[in-house]
Image: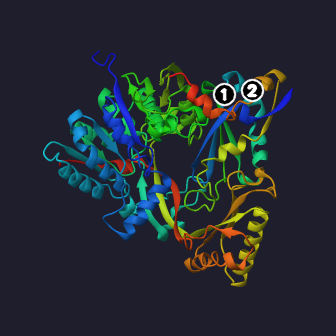
């Protein structure tokens, strides 16, 4: 077989919107790779992008991606590195247009093509879908979407690899999608390269695991690595993961020679468990993966072999990511110093609550944390000692009405002169009022979505 | 038998799915995986977190990785952008589980002493690593 021994290298360049801007540059310049995948989306990201598009119809995608491509587009074309990204967010068309413009500025006009995948956006079809009986019930609570229909701001189906494979067949050098499943950015190119079909479930399942290891960037190569973290070398120039995949799906996780971080059985295992649900049933649009089948061999020298992965046939449904307006919130902070820092912070919290109460303000939720004491371990942290050098009081409120949250933000700074002593850390001004975009995960028949997916490949 | 904190026996990673936090627990030494299984029951983990977890705790086993995965439902104050928590996405939720004490044979307690914590000379050891 011609694929015997052939290896396809898919490199990870971004693990989220806001990740290390230099990482993808290092991936392209640091050694041979075939594909660069850039994951920009998370549950929260889609709602942030949605807010941006609401203010500016040209926005709603990861602008970082466009400025990145302006830097690396020529090198990618020269080296034959194809780029696959979900940077399109809630506005993939706007993203692809900005990308083409960046390509012309970078001097690749006439030498590069951009693939655009659309059709994951269900917003314009939402009422007809509901009318046809698709209830889009919340996957956790079971509530039907009609309960919040008027407040829905965006609805996107998590789509599989088929449109990415199609765009690659059409010769696209860079592929921009909307709510592509994160892992599909890795296994899509593998399906294309090795000709895996939908019923090659074990191979695609392996590709999903490769994608899961890639999708959070350096989180598999020593970043945020708990085991012996103080020994991880050169995190300043941390190498992002590269998966070297064979035709049967077995692969090696590694990183460029000379880059920082490390790839070990432990670093890879930590990432495998990240955001894990039932490990026997990891559902993607193209396959169901059994993570209890994964075998890891640490080969040393920053190479971990991953094999033995099994999958089962995909379901008839796609997950839908829906964002809806769910009120307003704000968080205020003040810093109290020794002596009796925590007691002062708690006293300030009582004063604040009494003032809000006297103003007649009501909140759906009000939460007080002491950063430096209990904001991550809650009651497990116990009672704070009197000799704590300092602590940050952090108070958050949430309400349907913007006005009451707005008023809350004006009650923090006054505590500096009207509350307990030895307080600072208010120089940033009043807290910002944020609109809450809540997440509503639902399922929909794939047959309703997939015929609407469009792949459009254009020369830059 | 002796009681040791989980921090010496396992490392962890956590993440979020809506209002659910996941906590992956990985034995430093795969021989200790069975200890994790017998000691870290879903009920014990639920009791450990107390009011921090409003819903159920589910446990899944991954013997192939020497790891357990816990789903803590109703742990993130509504999750995502709804939450008022500093750790709204449960990024460090797993470290709270490292505080739990488990029962281990005396020789295991002895063997894992100091594991999982940065040694006092941690910075020095880093530079001493062989290239």
Horizontal arrangement in the rendering, residue B106 relative to residue A277 (left or right):
right
Quarter the N terminus of chain A occupies: top left
Q: Secondary structure at mark 2?
A: loop
Tell which of A391 and A167 is nearer to you.
A391
> Which residue, given by chain and number where applicable, does mark 1 sit on?
B28
Q: Nearer the viewer, residue A235 or B42?
A: A235
> In front of the other: label 1 or label 2?
2
Hey, which residue is sitting farthest right in the picture? B1
Q: Residues within 10 Å of mark 1 (few under 14, many from 20)?
A: many
Of callouts 1 and 2, which one flags the residue occurring earlier in the amino acid sequence? 1
Q: Observer-nearest residue: A293 or B3? A: B3
Residue at the spot 74% in from the left edge and 26% down from the top edge: B112
For mark 2, name the chain.
Answer: B
Q: Are marks 1 and 2 on the same chain?
A: yes
Query: Residue A458 location, x and y as percent?
Result: 18, 48
Considering the numbered disc 1 on the image, is that residue within a helix, a strand or a loop? Answer: loop
Q: Is residue A70 visible?
A: yes
The span from disc 1 to disc 2 (Cα, nearest Å) is: 9 Å
Residue bearing mark 2: B112
Determine the chain carrying the residue at label 1: B
Which residue is painted at 20% across and 44% down in the image? A113
- From this view, report whether residue A214 is shown above or below residue B56: above
Left or right: A29 as drawn, with respect to A380:
left
Tell me where residue A33 appears, x and y as whole percent.
Answer: 32, 31
Name of the residue lying farthest toward the bottom: A359
Asked if A217 appears above or below A155 in the picture, the reply is: above
**Whether residue A249 is situated above or below residue A318 in the rendered picture:** above
The disc at residue A64 is: none
Do the residues bearing badges 1 and 2 touch, measured as CB atoms within 8 Å? yes
> Residue B12 occupies which quadrant of the picture?
top right
Quadrant of the rendered structure where residue A433 is?
bottom right
């Amino acid at each position: 077989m011609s694929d015997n021994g052939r290896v396809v290298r898919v490199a990870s360049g971004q693990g989220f919107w806001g990740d290390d801007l230099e990482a993808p540059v290092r991936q392209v310049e640091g050694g041979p790779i075939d594909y660069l995948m850039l994951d920009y989306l998370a549950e929260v990201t889609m709602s942030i992008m949605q807010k941006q598009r609401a203010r500016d119809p040209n926005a709603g995608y990861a602008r970082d991606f466009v400025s990145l491509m302006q830097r690396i587009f020529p090198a990618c074309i020269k080296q034959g590195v194809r780029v696959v990204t979900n940077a399109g967010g809630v506005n993939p068309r706007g993203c692809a247009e900005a990308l083409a413009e960046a390509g012309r500025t970078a001097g690749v006009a006439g030498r590069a093509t951009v693939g655009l995948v659309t059709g994951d956006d269900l917003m314009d079809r939402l009422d007809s879908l509901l009318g046809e009986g698709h209830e889009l019930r919340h996957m956790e609570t079971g509530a039907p979407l009609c309960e919040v229909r008027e407040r829905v701001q965006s609805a996107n189906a998590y789509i599989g690899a088929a449109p990415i494979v199609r765009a690659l067949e059409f010769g696209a050098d860079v592929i921009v999608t909307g709510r592509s499943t994160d892992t599909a950015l890795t296994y899509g190119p593998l399906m294309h390269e090795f000709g895996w079909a939908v019923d090659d479930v074990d191979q695609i399942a392996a590709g999903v695991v490769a994608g899961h290891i890639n999708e959070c960037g350096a989180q598999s190569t020593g970043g945020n690595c708990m085991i012996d973290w103080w020994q991880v070398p050169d995190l300043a120039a941390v190498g992002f993961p590269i998966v070297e995949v064979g035709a049967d799906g077995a692969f090696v996780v590694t990183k460029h020679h000379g880059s920082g971080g490390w790839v070990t059985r432990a670093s890879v295992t930590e990432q495998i468990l990240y955001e894990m649900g039932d490990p026997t049933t990891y559902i993607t649009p193209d396959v169901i993966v059994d993570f209890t089948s994964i075998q890891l061999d640490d080969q040393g020298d920053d190479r971990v072999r991953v094999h033995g992965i099994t999958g089962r046939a995909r379901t008839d449904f796609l997950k839908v990511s829906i964002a809806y307006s769910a009120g307003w919130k704000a968080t205020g902070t003040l810093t109290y110093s020794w002596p009796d820092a925590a007691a002062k912070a708690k006293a300030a919290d009582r004063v604040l609550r009494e003032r809000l109460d006297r103003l007649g303000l009501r909140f759906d939720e009000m939460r007080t944390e002491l950063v430096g004491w209990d904001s991550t371990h809650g009651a497990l942290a116990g009672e704070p000692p009197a000799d704590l050098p300092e602590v940050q009081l952090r108070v958050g409120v949430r309400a349907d009405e913007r006005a009451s949250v707005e008023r809350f933000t004006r009650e923090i700074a006054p505590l500096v002169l009207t509350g307990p002593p030895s307080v600072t850390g208010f120089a940033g001004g009043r807290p910002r009022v944020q609109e809450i975009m809540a997440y509503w995960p639902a399922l929909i028949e794939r047959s309703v979505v997939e015929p609407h997916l469009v792949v459009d490949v254009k020369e830059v | 038998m002796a009681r040791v904190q989980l921090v010496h026996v396992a490392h962890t990673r956590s993440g979020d799915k809506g209002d659910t936090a996941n906590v992956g627990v990985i034995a430093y030494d795969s021989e200790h995986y069975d200890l994790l299984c017998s000691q870290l029951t879903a009920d014990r983990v639920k009791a450990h977190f107390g009011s921090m977890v409003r819903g159920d705790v589910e446990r899944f086993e991954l013997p192939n990785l020497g790891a357990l995965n816990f789903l803590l439902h109703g742990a993130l104050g509504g999750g995502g952008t709804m939450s008022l928590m500093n750790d709204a996405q449960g990024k460090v939720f797993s470290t709270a589980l490292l505080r739990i004490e488990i029962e281990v044979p005396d020789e295991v307690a002895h063997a894992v002493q100091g594991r999982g914590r940065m040694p006092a000379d941690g910075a020095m050891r880093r530079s001493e690593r062989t290239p």
